[in-house]
Amino acid sequence: MADINTIAQQFTDYYYSTFDADRAGLAPLYRDHSMLTWEENQIQGTAAIMEKLQASVSVVGPSRLGLPFTRVVHKVVTRDAQPGSSTVASILVLVTGQLIVDDGSNILQFSQMFHLVPDGGSYFVQNDVFRLVYG
């Protein structure tokens, strides 16, 4: 198995560049049993996750489906990786960074955790937890 830090870097480089350029390209990274927690909202399955990631809304509230921005650039500040299990070659990846959204006048801090599980010769996202960091 390749070094988990190398896998974590390759994965996050791909994930964030794809997210910033064309979010539809993230669909192959998720499965029907994958779960995304965006802030405190849990979303399960590829279709529902992609609906969340691709839609943009301006309405704030618990019923909103999309993201509160249309354009975003991720800047990774830290990235840590650990083995996710002693029995499966899964990887936990924790990222902290900055989001530059829409007009770029407000930089937001974020943290994101990925649980990557092997599938054939690559990995898929079993769990994805995203949080904005305030303060």
Image (cartoon, grey):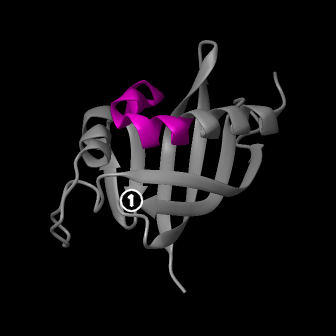
Residue 18 lies, in percent from the top left, at: 47, 34
Farthest residue in the top direction? 120
Q: Secondary structure at mark 1?
A: strand
In the rendered structure, the answer to whether residue 48 lies left or right of residue 116 reads left
Q: Amino acid at mark 1?
A: Trp
Task: Look at the image and give the residue range highlighted in magenta.
Answer: 15-32
Magenta run includes residue 77:
no
Q: Is residue 2 above or below residue 65?
A: above
For the C terminus, which image quadrant?
bottom right
Question: In this rendering, would 135 be left or right of 53?
Answer: right
The residue that appears at 15% across and 64% down in the rendered structure is 63
| Residue at point 53%, 52% (across, down) | 74
Q: Which of the 4 image quarters holds residue 3?
A: top right
Work out whether residue 80 or residue 34 is closer to the camera in this orientation and state it: 80
In the rendered image, is residue 31 in sight?
A: no
Residue lying at the far bottom in this picture: please name it: 135
Q: Which of the pair 89/19 is nearer the observer?
A: 19
Left or right, 19 with reference to 112: left
Residue placed under numbered mark 1 in the picture = 38
Q: Is residue 23 magenta?
A: yes
User: Residue at point 63% right, 37% down?
Assistant: 13
Look at 37% across and 34% down and name the residue there.
Answer: 22
Task: State whether the magenta stretch is mostly helix, strand or loop.
Answer: helix
- Placement of 1 over or under 3, stated as above or below: above
- Residue 42 percent coordinates (x, y): 34, 56
Q: Is residue 72 above or below residue 11?
A: below
